[in-house]
Amino acid sequence: MPDLVVKRGWLGRALDRTAKTLLGFRIVRAPARALANSRIAWSIVSRIDRVRGLRAKSRLLSIDQSRLPNHISIIMDGNRRFAWANSMDSVHGHSAGKEKLKQVMRWVLDLDVPYLTVYALSSENMASRAEGEIEVLYDLYVEGLNEISVDPLIHENEVRVKVVGRLDLLPERVRRAIDTAEESTEGYDRFTFTICLAYGGREEIVDAVKRLAREHADGELDLGSIDAGAISSRLYTSELPDPDLVIRTSGEERLSNFLLWQIAYSEFYFTDVHWPSFSRQDLYWAIEDYVSRGRRFGS
């Protein structure tokens, strides 16, 4: 791609190419994944990341900002695997994931990316996870949302917080925390942080179609006026632009029912790192990879 913005030294580029080639082999990928999520890696990366992260941030901020993604979406996967890899119970993994989200929010704000959307709890998770684990998650959401409502980072950067999904399925204590976070930030419009809770992409489309059907049955909507725009305007995320970049952690390479309508032309980035181990450098690598691509939007 002409005018490529990622200007690394020749040695760095060579190491990156070699690493990517080696990771194509399962015999290398499996131990590399274990090492990437180990306590040793966590300690080393946390130190090196400060220096490398600042350099990567400088590279990204030096380019035409219109080339950065306008909307980043993240499938935050791997809390439990992170916990198991570090001999913890799943509660500690989910707690570490919650703290990681705070860090990632700061990194995204530092780059002036105006939209961040995260997949926190799927409708499938609600049905398949043990009741005790789900209750722990609910408690973490309440804690996190209440923290957001008073977080100086949120208010200083004028971040509007939105929570979308089938929220009626959530316990009352979670819904109250959602109301608190949304009401405390509803006057902001500089950044938008969207949390998908009790969410499923298929369910979202079904709900949009039901709304269209009701409006048509009531005589409010002509059949000929139903198009892609009509569906988009009735989704939970109708106020958001479609994601430019979707990041999924923990090595899985599937969508898991996330924003199925909205990501028709999104770019995808998959990393083996579990969500609690996701570093600033991992985020910058994802964005640099996005910038290096030529988006065609189906052409």
Image (spheres, helix red, strand yellow):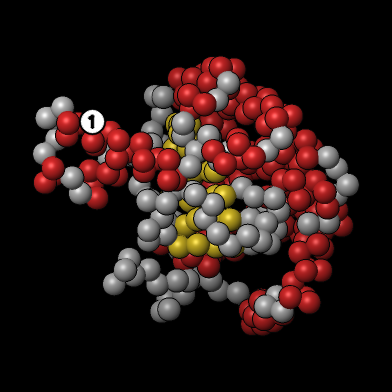
Residue 158, image x, y percentages:
46, 31
Give 292 or 172, whichever is nearer the viewer.
Answer: 172
Q: Tell me: residue 243, above or below residue 98.
A: below
Reading the image, the residue beneath label 1 is: 214
**Which quarter of the rendered picture does the C terminus lie within?**
bottom left
Give 51 or 101, whichever is nearer the viewer.
Answer: 101
- Three-letter code for the amino acid on which mark 1 is drawn: Arg
Q: Tell me: residue 72, above or below residue 296.
A: above
Give 43 or 61, whichever is nearer the viewer.
Answer: 43
At x 53%, y 34%, the residue is 198
Name the image quarter holding residue 265. bottom left
At x 31%, y 68%, the residue is 298
* Element type where label 1 sits in the image: helix
Relative to 112, 253 lies left or right: right
Q: Tell me: residue 33, above or below residue 217.
A: below
At x 41%, y 79%, the residue is 2
Q: Tell me: residue 24, above or below residue 239.
A: below
Q: Is residue 111 visible?
A: no
Residue 235, image x, y percentages:
34, 39
Q: Is residue 98 visible?
A: yes
Relative to 216, 167 lies left or right: right
Residue 120, image x, y percentages:
58, 39
**Which quarter of the rendered picture does the N terminus lie within?**
bottom left
Residue 96, image x, y percentages:
74, 40
Give 50 or 211, whichever is nearer the viewer.
Answer: 211
At x 38%, y 68%, the residue is 295
Relative to 140, 124 lies left or right: left
Which class describes the residues within 10 Å of circle 1: few (<14), some (14-19), or many (20+)? few
